[in-house]
Image (cartoon, rainbow, N blue to C red):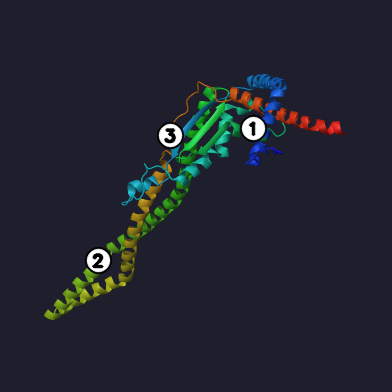
Amino acid sequence: MVLYIWPMQAPPSENPAQAAASFGSAHLLQFIFAKRKWLGLVGAAAALLSAGASLVIEEQFQSTVVLFATPQHSIGEQFFEELKQKDLLEYGETEDAERLLQILNSDQIRSRIIRKYNLWKHYQIDSAGKGARADLAKQYDSQVDANLTKFGSIEIRVLDKDPQVAADIANDIAFLADSLANRLRNDRAKEALRYASASYQQVKDEIRDMETELAALHALGIYDFETQIGGLNEQYATAMAVGAVKNAELIRLQMAELSKNATEFNKLTNLIEGAYDREKILKRRYELMKLDAETQIASAFVVDRAAPADKKAYPIRWLIVAVSVASSLLFALLALLAADQLKPAQAGA
């Protein structure tokens, strides 16, 4: 009897992709182990070079100011209006913060900071050089930043090699923004005040002229036409009833004299009453706008003022070294893999 023994086959892999990945990973690890000396040399060189480069980079210190914008309501309304719909002490909305942020990033603020701290010299930029203004603006933007936070506040961040200068610039930017916001508001109020003053003066002049004309009529004996003419009518009727014809004629002549100026007196009386009402309104508006034009009110609540930093913010040397070493090792590994793949092709050729 012949016994046949069939060779046993290994069961097929349940996941070919996983098996291929495992094989590839093992092959990569073997390759890295084989090239460990080269990779070690590359890593060490990258660490030394990046460490040296990071030591050359100038240290920068950061100072920060945090503030909330305030709503720019009329101050006069808070004092002269009976119904106050807005509160001067409330925090501003997003629109107020964005408006203040535009002022913080304005060219007026930038120019005053550059001039005060002589940033041309501080940043070592030749003002007579080609593209000097663009270079200064680029350097300023890299050192000074103002942005909205997720809490609705504004954060002013300033980097500088001198921690005291960084703190001073940050605080001055906040101060100048408040000053500029007040000046813009006051200038706008002064323009409105000129119109209000002119209108108020005009109605006062009209009242003065009408009062002069009424004084002339008063000199003629006209004080209250309707009351006077009513009284004379009663006297005339009484005189006629008792037969006092002479007295009745005198009374009639008085009424005729009053009637000559009746139209002018009634017109002036009606006009001056309306003028008094307009004068009252314009006077209140004038006082309101005068207060807005002359009063300074904070455009922001400063939460945190800048202080000189006692620790540098840039450069982070360990991070520079770590990123440089990691990127160098990655490129070196890719180069070695590419060279290894080219060997069989060269051998076959």
Q: Nearer the viewer, mark 1 or mark 2?
A: 1
The image quarter containing residue 13 is: top right
Q: Check disc 1: other Cα within 10 Å, few if <14, some if 14-19, many if 20+.
A: some
Q: Secondary structure at mark 3?
A: strand
In front of the other: 138 or 194: 138
> Tag 2 or tag 1, which sits nearer the N-term?
1
Q: Secondary structure at mark 1?
A: helix
User: Pointer 1: what residue?
Assistant: 136
> Tag 2 or tag 3, which sits nearer the N-term?
2
Please state if 220 lies on the left or on the right of 11 as rendered: left
In front of the other: 296 or 89: 89
Please state if 256 lies on the left or on the right of 37 as rendered: left
Q: Position of residue 68 (x, y in %)?
A: 44, 38
Going by the numbered disc 3, the residue's amino acid type is Val
**Residue 224's mark?**
2
The image quarter containing residue 205 is: bottom left
